[in-house]
Amino acid sequence: MSGETQPVPGPSERLMRAGSGQRRIVVWRHGQTNQNASGVWQGQLDTELSEVGREQARAAAEVLATYRPTLLVTSDLLRAAATADALAQVTGLQARVDPRLREIHVGEWQGLTAGDVAERYPDLQDQVMRGEDPARGVTGETVGQVVERGRPALREVAEQLAGGDRGGDHARGDRAGAGGRPGRDRPAYGLDGARRTAQLLLGRARRAPVRLADRPVEPGSGAMSVASMLNRVVRSRAHVGRERSLSMTPKQQWRVMNLYPPFLGIGLRIYGWTDDWTEVRVKLLLTPFNRNNHGTAFGGSIGAMSDAFNALLLIGQLGPDYLVWDTEAQVRYVSPGAGTVYATFRVTPEEAEDVRREAASGEKVLRWFDTDLTLKDGTVVAHARRQVYVRLKRGASRPDLEGAESAR
């Protein structure tokens, strides 16, 4: 195996380097599907990549090929196999198919939107939010069952890498990966919740000298919502069996989200968040990792700027008695993102109170929020629309709207 020339290390590469003799697994999530873009639960539905997803897979494959991987493993679902095939085409590798690496089966949720699931299965959703591990969608799998079937597969890859091969692997969520020798290959990059997935499957007891990498190759594939990630961060700090609190101050939310790997990877930074949960300001830096062929911001990165912010502002104002989800997104591109792109997301107290009033009956409320994404001089790059679903949780006390009115 050649490759004695050392690439010039950047900050992320110096961070990723490990001790001599180690190998890396890059856990690589599949590209976008139409179901991802529509907010539909896929589970083990055998969906295909969208045109955006195919382009994401091609772009990521070009980067991953620079590690000179020798092993490529994929789930048998179409979206995963097609993503792996993009890397196979540029490396000459033949992907090994392993059905144990399939996405979690989500039972009756498969094919439903997040809003549909929240409306039809509120008790099950509440269990998940409390940190419990029920069978998803009544007839689906638990995370524990996914670990039981997926961990042996990923450990086999780790052991093979420890024996001298370098390679790639698709893990739980139909993610894929590639490995390489630190200091001789470029740093490895994974997508979204991929590092969490690999650590879950490999477990704390793994002894194979394999290092995992978690910097994003390409954004916008919808592996995990921002709100879901934040909830998991908070829950992971609580002891099993105790009551969890998902509350954060705006400053805590700001800090956590600026450390979120997909945000770091696409160059997204929060630079302002009001204490009353009415406004958050973000900017998308133009970096080598989010530029397209024209040298401007990749459309998927621009679209990801609006992910969950209106929903999070509503959560902060409404409190813990409400289920709040992003259910639909529309992005209309107006001009190239030829520089840092800025956005300010707002939910006024009046808007939040209107939602609270409409949701008091226990019925779902759907509310659209519009935001312009602009350059520093005010040039509009894109117009984003987000639909947010809100419903009062079952068992929660209904707000005293009359008392609130009289107190005004």
Image (cartoon, rainbow, N blue to C red):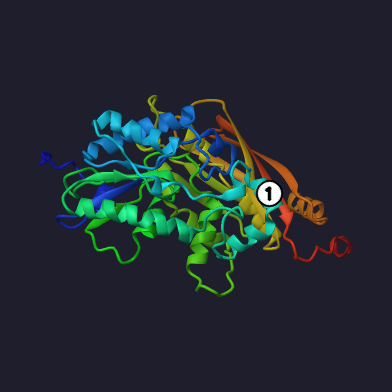
* Left/right of residue 194 with respect to residue 362 in the rendered view: left
* Residue 377 vs residue 46, the one in the foreground: 46
* Total numbered labels placed on residues in the image: 1
Split into 4 quadrants, where in the image is the C terminus? bottom right
For mark 1, give the secondary structure. loop
Which residue appears at 68% of the width and 54% of the height? 121
Placement of 291 over or under 393, stated as above or below:
above
Which residue appears at 26% of the width and 54% of the height? 158
Residue 145, given in percent of the width and then of the height, sits at: 46, 59
Which residue carries the number 1 mark?
Answer: 347
Placement of 316 over or under 65, stated as above or below:
below
Split into 4 quadrants, where in the image is the N terminus? top left
Q: Is residue 88 visible?
A: yes
Placement of 291 over or under 41, stated as above or below:
above
* Left/right of residue 283 with respect to residue 164 in the rendered view: right
Residue 154, given in percent of the width and then of the height, sits at: 32, 53
Q: Is residue 297 visible?
A: no
Q: Residues within 10 Å of mark 1 (few under 14, many from 20)?
A: some
Residue 54, given in percent of the width and then of the height, sits at: 42, 29
* Residue 205 vs residue 290, the one in the foreground: 205
Q: Residue 155: name its quadrant.
A: bottom left
Residue 353, given in percent of the width and then of the height, sits at: 77, 54
Q: Residue 169: name its quadrant.
A: top left
Placement of 295 over or under 239, stated as above or below:
above
Give the amino acid type for the residue marked by disc 1 in the picture.
Answer: Val
* Left/right of residue 108 with respect to residue 103 in the rendered view: right
